[in-house]
Image (cartoon, rainbow, N blue to C red):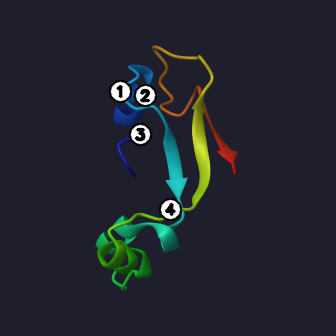
Amino acid sequence: MIDVICLRQAYERRQIAEVRWIEGITNPADSMTKGKPSSALKRLLDTNKVQLEVVEWVEHDGVGGGTEDPTEGFGAIPN
């Protein structure tokens, strides 16, 4: 699991503007965690451009501070 608590704190401090889920097939970083080749990484190296497909994103609803649940106050919104 990604450091959700650290991401949440950075988002609340406005150090991160947006959090988005990127589909694995278009995510060049996916090849660094999987044992198979990535066409997204090859495309990035060949064209020097990133082409991402955002599946969903996270919005902050204004709830914050002192919660035990690191996901409370955030909602995944499908694209």
Numbered disc 2: secondary structure: helix
The residue depicted at 57 percent of the width and 39 percent of the height is 58
The residue depicted at 35 percent of the width and 80 percent of the height is 42
Q: Nearer the viewer, mark 1 or mark 4?
A: 4
The residue depicted at 38 percent of the width and 65 percent of the height is 49
In this picture, is 68 found above or below 32?
Answer: above
Q: Nearer the viewer, mark 3 or mark 4?
A: 4
Mark 3 and mark 4 lie on one chain; the one further toward the N terminus is: 3
Residue under label 3: 4
Q: Amino acid at mark 2?
A: Tyr
Task: Give yes or no for contact between labels 3 and 1 (Cβ–Cβ under 8 Å).
Answer: no
Mark 3 and mark 1 lie on one chain; the one further toward the N terminus is: 3
Numbered disc 4: secondary structure: loop
- Label 4 packing within 10 angstroms: few (<14), some (14-19), many (20+): some
> For the view shown, which residue lies furthest in the top direction?
65
Q: Amino acid at mark 1?
A: Gln
Residue under label 4: 52
Task: Give yes or no for contact between labels 2 and 1 (Cβ–Cβ under 8 Å).
Answer: yes
Mark 2 and mark 4 lie on one chain; the one further toward the N terminus is: 2
Residue under label 2: 11
Residue nearest the observer in this picture, 72 or 77 = 77
